[in-house]
Structure formats: structure tokens, C-alpha cells
Image (cartoon, rainbow, N blue to C red):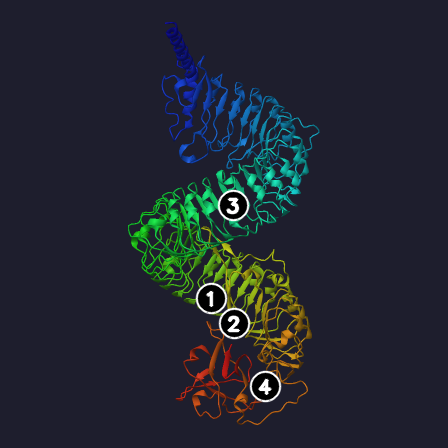
Amino acid sequence: MNSLSTVAMALLVSVIWMGLWDGTLGAGCSADEREALLKFKADLEDPSSWLTSWVGQEDCCTWSHVVCDNYTGHVTELHLGLPQPSNWSNSVLSGKLNPSLLELKYLGYLDLSNNDFHGIQVPSFLGLMTSLNTLYLDKAGFGGLIPHQLGNLSNLQHLGLEASKHYGLYADSLRWLSGLPSLKFLDLSNVDLSNASDWLNMINALPSLSKLYLANCQILHTPALANVNLSSLSSLSLYHNQFDQTSVPSWVFQLKSLTFLNLAYNTFRGPIPLQLQNLTLLRTLELASNHFNHSVPNWLYSLHHLEYLDLYSNKLNGRVSTIGIGNLSSLVHLDMSVNHGLEFERGIPESFKSLCRLRSLSLGYVKLNQNVSEVLEILGECASITLQELYLDTCQLHGQLTDQIGLFKRLNRLILPNNSISGPLPSSFGEMTSLNHLDLSRNKINGSFPTSFGSLTGLTYVDISRNAMHGVVLPEIHLANLTKLTFFLASGNQMAFKANPDWVPSRLLQILNLESWYVGPGFPHWLKGLQYLKSLDLANSGISEPIPDWFWSMSSQFYYMNFSLNKISGRLANIISVVGTDSLFDFSNNRLELPLPTISSNLTLLDLSYNLLSGNLVKFLCFRPSEMRTTQYLNLRGNLLSGEIPGCWKNWRSLEVLRLGSNKFIGRIPNSIGTLISLVALHIQNNSLTGEIPLSLGNCSKLLTIDLGYNGLEGEIPRWMGMSLSRLSILNLRANKFHGSMPVELCHLQFLQILDLSHNSLSGSLPECLSNFSAMATSDNTDVAVIYLFFGGGEVYSENQILLTKGSFVDYSTILNYVRSVDLSCNNLSGVIPEEITDLKELQYLNLSHNLFSSRMPEGLQTMESLESMDLSVNRLTGVIPPGIASLTFLSYLNLSYNNLNGEIPSSTQLQSFDSWSFIGNQDLCGPPLNKGCSASIVVPSSGNEDEEDEFLWFSISTSIGFVAGFAVTELDVDNYNDDDDEESELFGSGSGDVYYPSNDQDPYLKGVDEVTLTMYSDSVGTSRFRNILASASADKQFNIWDVVTQQCNITWANHKNKARMSLC
């Protein structure tokens, strides 16, 4: 019975205690406090109905987020903060704070963090709530000046004022902190303290302070402290400030109680400070994104309590101690990544085997030069049990992934891109069941897709792009259970994707990249229903079917779509709306036809180049004329578009790159092109445009590239180009009808890298100010305009130019920023080649051929050490070849033929390696590689039959042949003429004058020539392309070349190795 009584008494006590604990036996809140809370609620906006329980005459102690004292019933705590600032617009409290809170006389805890009060000032009445010991207003959307009245909260121990970045919370002084002597926790992160010069002295007067967070406070200056009073401080964050000093403030080293120190994202320089070794209690040390250099100091490994060490993105160099790092056996997180001069001498050392608590290891861009299997073996010894994140990108890893990868059961992030890892993926890959983020991109992994891949059910992100994987992927097997997959990036592999028509991929897919996989020939119907898909790349995937209507109905959900390099035919549907303001659609290199569609006004990039699109641009450009476009890149190059270019460009002012080349446009360039004030690159080459370049183009002052080559533009080259377009890097006016002199004003284009004015009718002398082309004169590329243009979706769209270099046309794109070229060939330029041209020390390609220059070659050519190609042929240059030219070690193409040069060709391995074609046509030039010795006399034989090897060697005719847009250089190979051959169709040396053919490699010459008749096949040279080449009426299809004495352009015939070559400029 006694035992039963004891039990009953115990139960009674328990019930009473529990009642006291949950407030059921308390008095309940007072009517005044309930009314105060209801007034407070009335001024709040509560879209998520957090406060639905705050109603009527209910006991407010039972309301959600309200805590009362169990004995008195007074409200003591309000928990109105969100756990994190996620999805603010749908769940946060906003509005204003009602002063009714002052009725809560016993309130000690107020949390409003992670809400959004839209920049209103922190209410000053909060300074009257003297019962508060904890006030959290972190990221609550307050702005303006922090009220000094907060200094009246003398009982405050915890103050969180971390600002929302959008609203500009600031303090002009922290003197009010002197009224908070009990403060232990202070967070002013993101608060602007740039004008609070007393910040350090005021904080130093808080002797109880244990945690201080001053991240991103725009602190400029750290004053010296005579006495440091922060003996209790255990956590300090000075993350991301703007200190005007390059060394860590000395007072930091006196904080001996520190366990947490964050100095990341500042501008501290020099070695990692030695004084940090005195902070022996440190568990977290964050020094990321500074400018610390030298090596990782050995004393760092004596901080045995370190759990978190972050040295990311500094300038550390040298070798890391292979033994010392093993002493940090408490390490949980180690980041040494992005220190490009740092290396482990023999890779990750054996001492890493003692890091048994390691959860995250990041050594990206640190030189390991190690077999990846060895890395797995070392880490697998102990860390495989704990490791969750492994970042080894760009570490010079090689070898193959082994089955040891399966030991890392807890690994959720495996990041190994940009190495040289080879071989197939091991079958044990499927044993990493915790994996959710995998990046093996840009390696040399081969073999087929492992079937075990489908076991990685937690995968959300996969990037295996740019490898050498091959074989067939059966998604029903390989990707069967990846229901959480959100990102799948696999471009650049040679895989075939064979999906059953009824296969359903992960419904969560947002980004799918299968570029260069074989997905076709049919259009993939399994894309249907992927409502979250926003980025799709199926470029070069073998699709030949038209895009179905059901897919076009999905187009509004995409911000990136790439179907380039397929054989897709049919129409391109109207693209009415797209996701966001950074959308890119690429349908280039297909067989799309019919007129252009209408497009969404917020489409950022549209590439329809190299299709079969026809018609004019009126509907496409002028659709919805009152609607401003945000398109930045428009490429319609290489289609069948025709008519005049419309004038409705004023609504396309965001356009940065415009490519309309290689179409059939006619007429003038419209004046409204000058409204494209954001334009960086303009390409309208290879059309049939006429008229002058419009003056309005001078308004496009951001232009880096102008390519108007191969048109029929006329007039003088505008002088304003050199003044208004000062940022020009590329100017290509090749093959037009420009006349007059080369404007001196072009010399103002100091950033010019490529100048092509060839194949026009320019005359006069070259300006002597060519040395002002600074980008061609200096190796310093810091001021040279960047050619690459970056857009969203991870894609890079680069500038390109087709240049005539070394006698051939080359398309430069990836290295265009390093190309320097001047081509003024095929004009009527005359006089002296100015010596100033030799100041262009970085010039690689120089072509002044087919002009009327009559001076000596510039003596300073020998200083142009970057020259790779120089063509001065077919001019009237005199004198000797400057001996110094032999020292141009990069020179791989040289053509000095058909001038009046004399003397001996300078001797060097370089010059003598050129073909004799480089020097022919200079009667008084001698020495190798010509067969003409310098002491031999010139013999002129009579015309007649010679041995077969000596027949008709070289024949040059100066003629006035105009150049027609769209055609640069034609080379025709025809059978070598043999005097024994009576076929007129192969005779190409007859004429009304006397033609003399010297033997060997000596120059041919003409005497009394008024008219020369060349006979060739009419399908080789069309009469419509060349003025002054007229087809005769005779049956043998002869072509008469007139005006042979006038030297404007040239035809050069050459007999070489039983072939004859004709070059037409």
C-alpha cells in the first residue's frame, strides 16, 4: 500500500510539473498583452498565414510563435523569424512594426529575422523595450540609419542586425554600443560602417563580447588599439571588407581565446602572418580570396585543434609539406584550391591517411601530377568513411578510376574535371549511393556507360562532357532510377542515345546537354512533358526530322535551346515568349527554310546562320514596332535573304553583335543602323550593298569590329571612322569600290589589330602615322579590345575573321585576339612605303602587293620580329633586299616577286628555304633560291622550241582588271603548254606582240604588246566576274585582255611541275 501511495504521489507531482511547464496551470496572458499582439498583427502582412491562431479572446499563450512565462502568464518571447531567407515573396512577414509591442513589459526575446519589411527604418521605440535580452533583426529588410536608441537596451546580450543587401542599412557611429555592457553576441554583417570611424574603439569596450560578425561592412580603416579588452572573444569575422591596409590588423593576434577567425575576401598580402600561430585554440581559420603569397608555413600544422582550414584563391606557391599536414588530425574541411603556384611534390602524401575526420577536401588547380588510383588508395585508408566532398579539378591527375571508388559510401560530391583521367568508369561507381553531384568533364574517360550508373538514385547533377566515351546508352537501364536528376551534361562524347518511345526521363530535368550524341534521325518524343526543362542542347545529334508542333508549344519554358549542326528541315515557328531576360536559341547549320519567324522581344541570342531562309527582313525586324527588343546577338549569316536591309533598327538598341553576311541584300546600309548604340560587332560582308557608309554609324562608338567586305560600297573611306569609332579593333572593307587616299584619321585607331582595305581603288601614298596603331606596336595586350563575347547558358560566342595570310585564306576565331594584320593589296597606292610601318613590332601579316610603290624596301623591316607573312609582290620596288630581313625567324611566307629589286638575295637558312617564286620577276636579282648566279650574264634566247622542262616558265601581264564583290583570288590549273601540241584550247601564250621566254628561272618579258589573247575553258573563269575580260565571238572561247600597259591589277601565269597557275587579284 505504501508503495502504491508513493507511485501515486510521484504521478501527481509529474502532472503538476508538466502543467507548469506547458502553461496549462498558469494564469494565461493578460488582456493588455493580447490586445497589444492583435494590434501588432494588424499592421503586418502575412501571406503565409503564420499568425492565423492570433484571434479573438483566446489565451495568447496558446498562439503560435508566442512563449509565455509558466508562472505569470506574461509574454516573454516572440519567435517570428524564418529559419532561412528562402522563397521570401511567398512566406515572409512585411508591413510595419506597431509600437503596441511596448505593452509587452516582460518581453525578453524578439526574433524578426529573415522577413522583408521593404527598407523601413528599424523603429526607434525598440530602444524602450528595456526588458529585451535578445533581439534578432537579421536579414529582415530594414534600411536606413540604425537608431541610437538601441543603446538603451542595457540588458541586451544578443543583438543580430545583419542587413539585407538590397536596403542599405548603415551606422554613422557605434557610440550607442557603450550602453550595452552585457552584450555577448553582435552581428552587424552587411551594415555599412564606412562612416563609423569609432567602430573598433566602441566594440573594444564590450568586455563580455564572445562573438563578433562584421562581414561585408565596407570598413576602410582599422585604427590601432593600445589595449585590447576583448579577452572573451571566441569568434571574429571580418569577411569581405575594404581595408586600406594590406596586412592583418595587429590587434587580431592578441585575441588568444579565438576559436573562429574569418579574414576571407579581403586584400591582405604577403606571407600568412606568423603571429597567427599564437592563436592556439583556433578551430576555424578562413583566409580565402586574399593575396597571401609565399609557401604554406610549417607552423600552420602546429594548430592541432584546427577543424576548418580555408586557403582558397590566394597566391600561395611552392611545395606543401608532405608530413606536417598529417598533424592536423582534427581537420574536417581543407581547401587549398586555386593557388596556381602550389604543388604537392609527389601528389597527395601518405600523411593524409591520418585525416580520419575529413569531410571536405578541395585541392582544385593545385599541382598533384599523380595517378588518380593512388589518390583513391590514400584517401580510402581512413577518410573514405567520412569524406562527403572531394574537389580535385585541374590537378594534373592521370591514370584510371579503380574499383576503390566504391569505398566512398558517404561521398555526395565528386568533382574531378579538367584532368587526364582515362579508361572506363568502373562498375563500382554504383556503390557510391550517397552521390548527388558528379563532375568528370574534360578528361579522357572512354568506354561505355556503366549499367551501375542507374543505382545512383540520389544523383541530381551529372557532368561527363568532353570525354571520349562511346557506345549505346539505353536510358531504361542506364538512367532508370535517376528520378531526382536535374542537370545532365554529357556533350562531346560519341554516344548513341536509344530510348523507347514510351521512356519517361526524370520529370525534374532542368538542363539536358547531349551535343554530339546520336539522338536522331527522328525528333526525340521523350522530351514531351518535361515541364521543368529550361536548357536543351541537341547540337550535332543527327536529327533530320522537322521540329514538331508540340515542341514549339514548349518553347516558352526555355532560356537556352541549341539544335545547331543537324539536318532539320521545315519551318521555324514563331517564338513568342521565352524564359527570363538571358535566353539563347541556336538553330544554325540546318536546312530550315521559308521566311523568318517573329521572335520574342526578350530573346537575348538568336543564331539562324547557314540555313535556307529566304525573303526579306521587313516582318522579322519590324514586327511590333513599338516594342523595345533586348536581343544582344543576331546571326542570320549564310542564308538566302534578299531585298534591302530595312530601316527599323531603333527598337533593337540592345544589339551588340549583328551578322548579316553572305546573303543577297542589295541597296544602301540604312541610316537607322546608327541607333544601335550598344553595337560591338557589325558584319554585313559578302552581299551586294551599294552607296556610301552612312554617317550615322559614327554613333556606334562601342564598335570593335566592322566587316563590310565583298560588297559594292563606294565613295571615300570616311574620315570620321578614325575619330568616332576609337575602340575599333577590326576594320575590314576588302573588295569594295572605295577610292581616294587612305585617311590619315585612321591613325587614331590605337586599338586596331586587323586592317584590311585590299581590293579597292585607293590611291596616293600611305600616311606616315601608321606607327600610331598601338595594338600592332606593343606586346602589351591589356589595352587591346577583348574579342570574345559572353552570353548566358555557359556558351561563348567569339568573333572571327577570314584573313588572307601566307597566300591562303584562314578563318581565325579562337586566337583572333592575338592576330595583327595589315592588308592593303590590290589598290593603286604609290610612292614610298613609309619607314614608320616598321614600328608595328607585333605585326604578323603584312600585304602591300599589287600596288604602285616605287621606293626601296624599308630598312627597319628587320625589327619586325613577329612577322610571319610579308607580301610586297607586283610593285615597283627598287634597291636591294635589306640584309636584316634574314633575321626574321618567324617569317614563313615571303613574296617579293615582280618588282625592280637588284643585287644578291641575302644569305640565311630562312630565305634560301623559300621557293624561287618568292623572288622571280626582279631582273637584276640573283642568288639562291633563284638559279641565276650573281656573276652570270643574262642571255635572251630567241623564241622557239626548247626542251620540255624549259618550255614556257613564267609569264606576267600587267592589266587593269577590276575586282568584283565576293571574289578574292582565283587560281586555275591548266595543262602545261607543249609546242608539239596543236590544240588551240590549251594555248595560253599567244598575242599580237612578241613574247620572249628565257630559259631556266629567268624573267620573261614582253615587247610591243598591245593586245594579248589567252585561251582557256569558259567554265573556269566567268565573264561576269571580271571587267575588261571579254569573251570573243569565236568558237574557241577566247578571252581578250585589254589595257595591258596600265598597272592596276595583275594576272600572273606560272609554270611549275607541269602545271600552270594563274592568279587573279
Among the two numbered marks 1 and 4 on one chain, the one whose residue lies closer to the N terminus: 1
Among the two numbered marks 3 and 4 on one chain, the one whose residue lies closer to the N terminus: 3
Tell me residue 996's x, y (percent): 56, 90
Cβ–Cβ below 8 Å for labels 3 and 1? no
Q: Residue furthest right?
A: 226
Tell me residue 424's x, y (percent): 44, 53
640 horizontally vs 847: left or right: left
Q: CA distance from mark 3 to mark 1?
A: 59 Å
Q: CA distance from mark 4 to mark 2?
A: 25 Å
Residue 506 can be seen, yes or no: yes
Q: Which residue is mark 3?
A: 377
Among the two numbered marks 1 and 2 on one chain, the one whose residue lies closer to the N terminus: 1
Q: CA distance from mark 3 to mark 4?
A: 74 Å
Q: Which residue is mark 2?
A: 808
378 horizontally vs 769: left or right: left
**Amino acid type of the residue tagged 4 in the rendering:** Asp
